[in-house]
Amino acid sequence: MSDAIYLSVVLPCRNQADHIGEVLSKYKEPLDKIGKSYELVVVPNACTDNTFEIVQELAAKDSIIRVVYNPDGGWGLSVLTGLAAARGAVLCYTNSARTDPAHIAILLEKYEKALPCLAKVRRENRAAPTREIGSWLYNLEGSLLYGIKASDINGTPKIMSREIYQKLNLSSPGDVLDMEVLAKVTHLGLPVVEFPVAGFKRHGGKSSTGLKSAWNMYAGAVKLRGNINSFKQGQK
């Protein structure tokens, strides 16, 4: 880890060739205003277009942008790949397609005031009834299985210290990574600071979330119990 980097923002992206350059440029103004060093760790996620090549070109021109490729795909694996490569003392990851970059600076301020903690966004008023119902069911599952009190388990950005990240020993390669994060944070008794935001329209492209992926998340949350039980045993 380089002491020169304060904040690492991990940005998985998939098939965003037509707008990824514009998206990354939008992070600069709000993050410059925090007055501390930062980097954007961009993780092309098994892209079938030239997103990876475009980000490579951007990274060659701008030292703030770094790129690490995840050829195998998967939300969790992309986040873990980016976090493993990140050099910052404070680590953030978020959905590059659905994040307002200004929210990271606001969330960071809340995180710094509540240390030690996990800080995250809580999405509200998404104007998508099916997604709202699916999210409610997933949050209920997290509450029943793992005692998670925070709402909107999958809400990003999420911000944590490097020390907490290392303690969590995250490993989920798929869509249940956020459930793993909240379950382990809950077990450790760490506070979760939530910042409510209105739903944010995608920057572009199409969502890969569907009935099959939703079902896999519900089933994956149950299968996660072995991981969480092993984590609890390791904490004794």
Image (cartoon, rainbow, N blue to C red):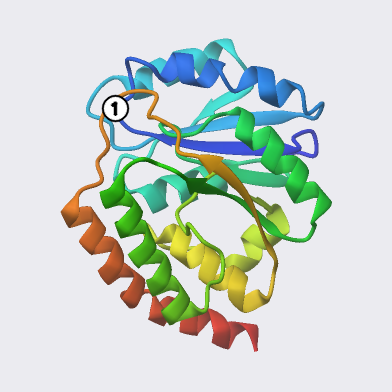
Residue at image location 78% in from the left, 28% down from the top: 34
Query: In terms of secondary structure, where does tag 1 sit?
Result: loop
Q: Which of 96 and 170 is in front in this view?
A: 96
**Would residue 112 be found to the left or right of residue 209 on screen?**
right
Residue at image location 42% in from the left, 80% down from the top: 145
Q: Which of 47 and 189 is in front in this view?
A: 189
- Residue 186 percent across, percent down from the top left: 60, 73
- Callout 1: few (<14), some (14-19), or many (20+) C-alpha neighbours within 10 Å? some
- Residue 52 percent across, percent down from the top left: 36, 24
Q: Which of 140 and 59 is in front in this view?
A: 140
Q: Name the residue tied to disc 1.
A: 15
Callout 1 amino acid: Asn
Which of the 4 image quarters holds residue 50? top left
53 to 130, vertically: above or below: above
**Would residue 59 be found to the left or right of residue 112 on screen?**
left
**Would residue 125 be found to the left or right of residue 175 on screen?**
right
- Residue 133 percent across, percent down from the top left: 31, 58
Task: Say which quadrant the C terminus sits in.
Answer: bottom right
Residue at image location 49% in from the left, 33% down from the top: 99
Q: Which of 187 and 99 is in front in this view?
A: 99
Whether residue 174 is visible here, answered yes or no, is no
